Image (cartoon, rainbow, N blue to C red):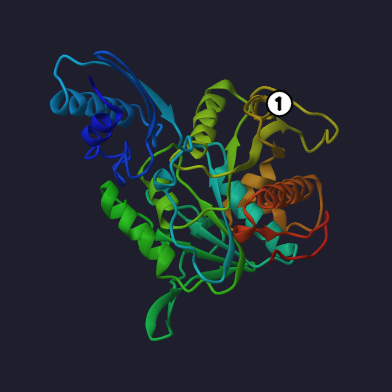
Amino acid sequence: MVTRKQVEEALSAVSNASGKGLLMASNGLRNVQIMGNEVMVDVICDSPVLHQKKKLEVEVLQALHARIDPKLQVKIHLIVEAPETPESTVLRGKAIPGISHVVAIASGKGGVGKSTLTANLGVTLAGMGFKVGILDADIYGPSMPLMFDVMSDRPGGIEVEGVRKMEPVESYGVKVMSIGFFAGTDQAVVWRGPMATKALNQMLQETHWGELDFLLIDLPPGTGDIHLSMVQALPITGAVVVSTPQHVALADARKGVGMFQMEAIQIPVLGMVENMAYFTPAELPEMKYYLFGKEGAQQLAHQLEVPFLGEIPLVQSIREAGDVGHPAALQPAGPTVEAFTHVAQNMISSLADRIENLPPTEAVRITTMAGCKTRPRKV
């Protein structure tokens, strides 16, 4: 006759599904029922991962057969008591002292105006009174030196607490760091992933950013090594995804949002921005021509249940301003400035909402109203 004591002794050496501790020591055996040569047990599984659950079930079965009777009929009922996403799978890096918020600007597809938005968002936030920095993380196609008219500049050096660090180049009140400062105009950066990742981490960690309210990271198109490296390098407060209204861009933008929402990443998507939303001729300022489709990114944002931050028109002056290194948002006034200001205000509002939902130990509150010159403050 099989006894409960035999069952407990047989399972004494079986580990938990996660590999942390022993099953019996964790009170992982529940509700043992014995009827002749048949044993039914409830086993607590501390991991939701499929292969770990299967492994635990096999080990329990093998232990009972080996230590009691090979012919014993065993029925195992696994009860999962674990969070759906174990903390160990969430990638988080070390925060950089002095930087309050890190916002990643991403796009699934190239050529949708991600760098243009980053540059103009940076000067807009600076104009609102925030301290802003931009890290040009597009290693293979850096744009920030050109967009801020600092192509010939080079980062300086400074000693901080006995450590030699680089000083970012400052333009229009925004601190900028880019691989473009170190590579020649005609020099292609032909690096494999690990080398590009190392260079990016050096620019990030070995730069003396000082006190910043926002560090905007201009990510390269797609979802690859650089994106994962940034997630691992430091905690990112949130992400903004840029797309044009056309379907081919929206398909990639959907993947971009999905990347940040992956279980192993879990970065809040602050919202989507629709660039090149419509064309307005200078001689017909009241007309809107939807050359790439209408409200595509706005509709996708609603489908994915992420905020829609606003739309940027297809205006010749935005392109011209970027080409001469004078972001269009620096203009005194006009529809273009209003569009970038609207996106910036909505991003701040979305960021404040997301931060309100974080655990109290990580909470950061932004107190701001549209157009007010206020800065984020930790609470």
From this view, report whether residue 84 is shown above or below residue 192: above
Q: Residue lying at the far right in this picture: please name it.
A: 286
Which quadrant does the C terminus fall into?
bottom right
Position in image of residue 355 (x %, y %): 66, 52
Residue tagged 1: 295
Residue 190 visible at all = no
Q: Amino acid at mark 1?
A: Glu
> Of 149 and 312, which appears nearest the observer?
312
Position in image of residue 315 (x %, y %): 69, 40
The residue located at (65%, 24%) in the rendering is: 303
**Left or right of 57 in this view: 276:** right
Quadrant in the rendering for residue 249: top right
From this view, report whether residue 42 is shown above or below residue 9: above
Label 1: state its secondary structure: loop
> Of 175 and 64, which appears nearest the observer?
64
Which quadrant does the N terminus fall into?
top left
Residue 192 visible at all = yes
**Left or right of 227 in this view: 198:** left
The residue located at (45%, 44%) in the rendering is: 220
Position in image of residue 70 (x %, y %): 14, 18
> Of 326 and 258, which appears nearest the observer?
258
